[in-house]
Amino acid sequence: MSINLKIISSKTGEVFREKCHSILFTSQSGEVEVLSGHIPLIANITENTNIVIKTEGGEQIAFLAASFGFFTFNCNECLISLTSCTRQQAPADQSTSQVKMKKAS
């Protein structure tokens, strides 16, 4: 089973829409990974964090959330809403903090 993910930005509208296997991001409570079948979740996304998405095909895609945003998940439907974000290169098998450190180097 997959997650139907949509990322929207108030500056550019829909940024990304795809079925995926997992979503990894940093919330105000710490690092969170959501897989298909996860319990319903609402979380704040912290400023300047990476959102790492693993697609059904195994590709990893990362977005840098330049500002705060929110994450909602229910019944394998996920919406991430941000003020602005940019797509990044995601190294294989990296946590969000490792992606952030690599980008800063």
Image (cartoon, helix red, strand yellow):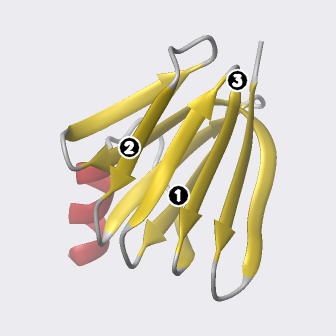
Left or right relative to 67: residue 88 = right
Q: Are marks 3 and 1 in contact (CB under 8 Å)?
A: no
Q: Earlier in the sequence, mark 3 or mark 1?
A: 1
Mark 2 vs mark 3, CA separation in Å? 15 Å
Q: Secondary structure at mark 3?
A: loop
- First in residue order: circle 1 vs circle 2: 2
Q: Are marks 1 and 2 in contact (CB under 8 Å)?
A: no
Which amino acid type is shown beneath numbered disc 3?
Asn
In the rendered image of this protein, does residue 91 appear above or below residue 31?
Answer: below
Q: Which mark is residue 62?
A: 1
Mark 1 crowdedness (10 Å alpha carbons): few <14, some 14-19, many ≥20: many
Residue at 53% across, 57% down: 62
Instruction: Examine the image and state in which quarter residue 20 appears.
Output: top right
Q: How far apart, in angstroms, are the residues tagged by discs 1 and 2?
A: 18 Å
Q: Classify 10 Å Cα crowding around label 3: few (below 14), some (14-19), many (20 and above).
A: some
**Residue with the mark numbered 2:** 43
- Circle 3 residue: 76
